[in-house]
Amino acid sequence: MKSRERVLSAFARKGYDRIPVKHEGTPEVNRMVIDHFGLRNMDQLLKVLGDDFRYVEARYIGPELRSFPDGSFEGYWGERYAYVQFSSGKYMESVYKPYAEVQELSKLDRSHFPSADWFDYSTIKRQCELLGDEYAVCFGGPGDFDFINSISRARGMEEVLIDLIEDNEVMMELMEARFSFYYEMHRRALEAAEGLIDFVHIGEDLGNQRGPMISAELFERHFAPKYRKYFEMAHSHGAKAIMHMCGTVDSFLPRLIELGLDVQDVVQPTTPEMDIASLKGKFGASLVFQGSLDVQKEIAVGTPEDVRREVRRRIDLFPRGGLFLGPSHAIQAGSPLENILALYEEAGSLMKDIDDSVLALGEVEDDVDKVNLAKLF
């Protein structure tokens, strides 16, 4: 099977030659694997690991995103980011929040609200055609919509959670602006692709490690109508919807299924309710899962055999599909290389012989150490 056939067959629970996989790693992890195999870019890395998905993008043509003397740089909404070094790697964190102190609509500066016009969609169909039937084609990413997490980067997490309870008018305006921006961007991309995009990818961090971030009532009031409208639009263009959700989110899944969600990404098994077997038993007839291999336990601090055992457990649970195998988040810096390789080898996706056709893929050199900004904004 080619990747696209494998993914779509697994989505429909019609079987597969091997379980579909989707890789996600921090820049440090991707660099480690690239160096191990003597590769030069992410295209080659994904091919060697056997990732079955590829993304097409709308080219940014909007106002220049500024960089500042302190090393920080601007996001779409006027927020600023900088790299923060931790013991095992570096992460980009928000260092300037333009809406942090704003409590009245009259004081809300809308000059930094982005527009779908800032992107060129004219090459999307051609990008899809170049991928052909080789890979499952995706558009978007975990940072699209992402109201709680991403608005927090421009306003503050505590303020955002209070805003949702109080129906704060500034927060409502920011949510509506963010929804309109990404809805229109995705609509234009799907329209331009003319049916060649298989999956659209969005995100919302509805859970933390122990439970939900917000109540069901708040979800229904502020989120459900927006997601229903978006899922209906995506389905009208023949695309299936993937939604990235960190943490414990099982209580939201019945409603999300009703609203039209197709795939839950990334399945963090932080509580018994989020164990992949539990999720399959409750929701597996209506929802496909993506991810689920624990980046905090087996991959990070286990042995290769621990990782292999968890991979085999998932293959046994989903013998005909219903799971796209991968990590429960980006594999973190400091994770042993042998554990990462064990994941993909046991899944049957790791390439055994790297030939010249693989080494010819992509640009001669990618900046593989760079975080994908589209996942943040």
Image: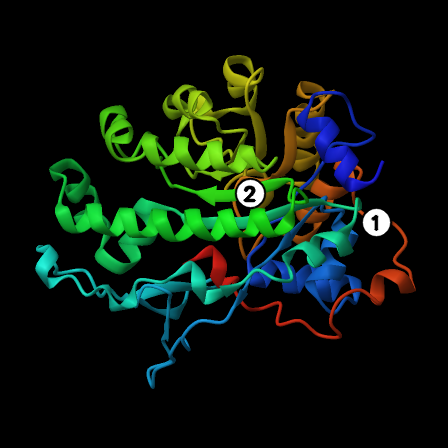
- The amino acid pointed to by label 2 is Val
Question: In the rendered image, which residue does mark 1 sit on?
Answer: 351
Question: Which residue is depicted at the point 70% across and 57% down?
Answer: 127
Q: Is residue 348 left or right of residue 170?
A: right
Disc nearer the start of the sequence (1/2): 2
SS class of the residue under badge 1? Answer: loop
| Nearer-the-camera pick, 334 or 93 | 93
- The amino acid pointed to by label 1 is Met
Question: Which residue is depicted at the point 79% across and 44% down?
Answer: 133
Q: CA distance from mark 1 to mark 2?
A: 27 Å
Q: Of the residues tagged 1 and 2, which is closer to the observer?
A: 2
Question: Which residue is depicted at the point 90% across and 54% down?
Answer: 353
Decide: is 19 above or below 46: above
The quadrant of the picture occupied by the N terminus is: top right
Question: Which residue is depicted at the point 50% across and 48% down?
Answer: 186
x%, y% of residue 93? 36, 63
Which quadrant would residue 86 be assigned to in this image? Answer: bottom left
Question: In the rendered image, which residue does mark 2 sit on?
Answer: 200
| Nearer-the-camera pick, 96 or 77 | 77
The quadrant of the picture occupied by the C terminus is: bottom left
SS class of the residue under badge 2? Answer: strand
Circle 1: is it few (<14), some (14-19), or many (20+) Cα within 10 Å? some
Decide: is 234 above or below 279: below
Are the residues tagged 1 and 2 within 8 Å (C-beta)? no
Q: Residue furthest bottom?
A: 69
